[in-house]
Image (spheres, rainbow, N blue to C red):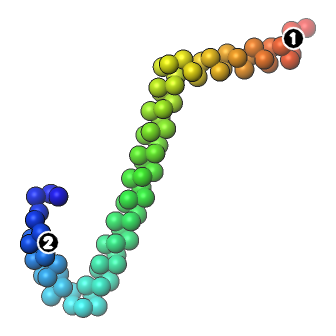
Amino acid sequence: MLGIGFWEIVLILLIAFIALGHEGFIEAAKKVGRWLKAMQRELAEVRKDVEDIENKITDELNGCGNKNDSQQIHREDRKNPPT
C-alpha cells in the first residue's frame, strides 16, 4: 500500500484530526469517502469497457463475428432476390 504502514496512517489521521478539528475532520472524511466511491465506480466502468472490447476482438479473431455477418447477408439475399 504505497509503502505506508499502519502506524504512519495513524499518525497522518491524528495530525489531520488536530489540524481540522472534530467537525472539519468528519467533513473531510466524508469527502474522501465520496471521492473513493466515485473512483471505484469509474474504474469498474473502465474495466467493463476493456473486457467488452477484449471479448469483441477475441470473437472477431476467432471468426465468430464474420460467420454471423455472412449468414445475415445470405438471409437478406434470399429475402430480396435481384431483379
| Place of residue 56 in the rendered image (x, y in percent of width and height, measured from the top left) | 51, 30
Quarter location, residue 16: bottom left
Question: How many callouts does the rendering have?
Answer: 2
Q: Which residue is mark 1?
A: 81
As displayed, is residue 47 above or below residue 11?
Answer: above
Viewer-proximal residue, 67 or 24?
Answer: 67
Which residue lies at the image location 43% right of the left edge and 40% below the top edge?
50
Q: Amino acid at mark 1?
A: Pro
Q: SS class of the residue under badge 1?
A: loop
Q: Is residue 67 left or right of residue 5?
A: right
Using a 10 Å C-alpha cutoff, classify the residue at mark 1 as few (fewer than 14 neighbours), some (14 to 19) or many (20 or more): few
Q: Which residue is mark 2?
A: 9
As displayed, is residue 63 above or below residue 44?
Answer: above
Q: Which residue is situated farthest in the right direction here?
A: 83
Q: SS class of the residue under badge 2?
A: helix
As displayed, is residue 50 above or below residue 66?
Answer: below
Q: Is residue 13 left or right of residue 83?
A: left
